[in-house]
Amino acid sequence: MDIARPSQAGKKRNKRLLLAGAGIAAVAVISLGLSRLRPAAPTVERSGVWVDTVRRGAMLRQVRGLGTLVPEEVRWIPAQSEGRVERILVQPGTVVKADTILLELSNPQLDLESLDASWQLKSGEAEYVNLKVKLESDRLDQQAAAATVEANQAQARLQADADEVLAKEGLVSALNSKISQSKAEEMTTRLDLERKRLAISGEADRAQLNVQEARLEQLRARATLTRHKVEALKVRSGIEGVLQQLPVEVGQQIATGATLAKVTVPGRLKAELHIAETQAKDIQLEQPASIDTRNGLVAGKVTRIDPAVQNGTVKVDVAITGPLPKGARPDLSVDGTIELERLADVLQVGRPAFGQEMATVGLFRIEPGGGEATRVQVKLGRSSVNLVEIVGGLKEGDQVILSDTSAWDAFDRLRIK
């Protein structure tokens, strides 16, 4: 006879549910554990990164910038009048003297003006001489008239005195004596008037001559100016040096004030350096500098700091104090280093790829044993070209990676191989 078995379906279902729950719990525990694990540290080759050791000692603060050699004395030669380039006598690079003619211009209108001014000056000079002669002749006539009046006055005075004596003796009537006396007084008055006229005439003559002399000076200045303009058509260097530029061509029409040439003194050069504006704040006048001309180093000192910032840089002029090496010439590219100050005893390390002075940056410090590097926050102080002061975060003897580590910003540890 068949015996009925008890049902096992419920037990199997419960067992499956229990196993599923246990599996889910295990997965949750494993996921939680994995989430708390740190990401695996990337591995870097030690030879592929720049490692430096923190040290204590003296530090020379410097800033560096690129620039060019430029002449201290430059003469730009402008056109004093418009004209056409007829001839070019000297080419750039030629040594010239102050009176060397660089090129010749032509201006027919200016030639006519100069000729006209010259003839007007000669006419003015002739008029002046004519006026001077005429005034001298008139003055002589007035002096002769005054002399005649003076003689008549003396004669009338003598006649009056004689008639007075004869009148007292009864030889001449008293009326005739009075008439003679009246004539004498009249001639005395006329003599005074003639003398005043002569004095006034002299002042009038001087006034007329002054007017003519002023006009003559004006004509002479105009003639001199036009003559100088004509002479300036032969363009001279003006200083002894080297012709640097001649930006004109034969046949070219030149306007007044246009640049014709540039002459420099090659033996007197200075360096114009372009320093980043973030590094230029500590530069002062008279600070020592060193200029690398790619053919030798030469000493210098800061003589001028441009107050304006252009394209993120500050222009600094450095006067050359030492002898220039061979091959030094205007527009030569140079590399300049300016000495800011000497710090006696500071904690320092090589300057990292990223990080400005007085900032806090993250650097990887190599742990003892050299197999691993850990990111630490480092506070930087004053900086130089290749060095930076350590204010906090590192101690003497620590080794840090100074290369660009931006590729590992997501990690706090590195494996060093």
Image (cartoon, rainbow, N blue to C red):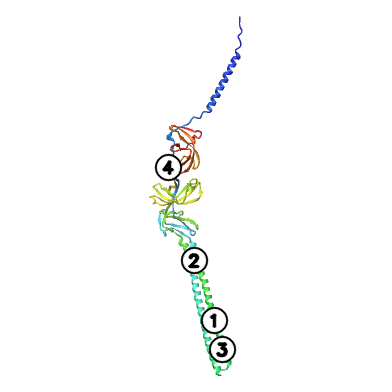
Q: Are marks 2 and 3 in contact (CB under 8 Å)?
A: no
Q: Compared to 128, does 372 lie above or below?
A: above
The residue that disc 1 covers is 194
Q: Nearer the viewer, mark 4 or mark 3?
A: 4
* Dot in front, 2 or 3: 3
First along the sequence among labels 2 and 3 = 3
Q: Which mark is residue 181?
A: 3
- Nearest the viewer among 296 and 49 is 49
Rendered-image quadrant of the C terminus: top left
Q: Is residue 95 visible?
A: yes
Crowding at dot 3, Cα within 10 Å, few <14 / some 14-19 / many 20+, comes out as many
As helix, strand or loop, the secondary structure at mark 4 comes to strand
Mark carried by residue 57: 4
* Most foreground residue, 352 or 160: 352
Where residue 204 sits: x, y (%)?
A: 53, 75
Q: Earlier in the sequence, mark 1 or mark 4?
A: 4
Mark 4 or mark 3, earlier in chain: 4
In the rendered view, would you say 138 is above or below 103? below
Real-space CA distance between mark 4 and mark 2, rounded to the nearest whole angstrom: 73 Å
Q: Amino acid at mark 3?
A: Gln
Amino acid type of disc 1?
Answer: Glu
Q: CA distance from mark 1 to mark 4?
A: 104 Å
Mark 2 to mark 3: distance in Å?
60 Å
- Where does residue 150 sit, x and y in percent of width and height? 52, 84
The structure residue drawn at horizontal position 52% and vertical position 86%, both measured from the top left corner, is 154
What label sits on residue 221 in the rendered view?
2
Identify the residue at image location x=55%, y=91%. Answer: 164
Instruction: Tell me the kind of residue under disc 2.
Output: Ala
Q: Are marks 4 and 3 in contact (CB under 8 Å)?
A: no
Q: Residues within 10 Å of mark 4 (few under 14, many from 20)?
A: few
> Does residue 116 show up?
no
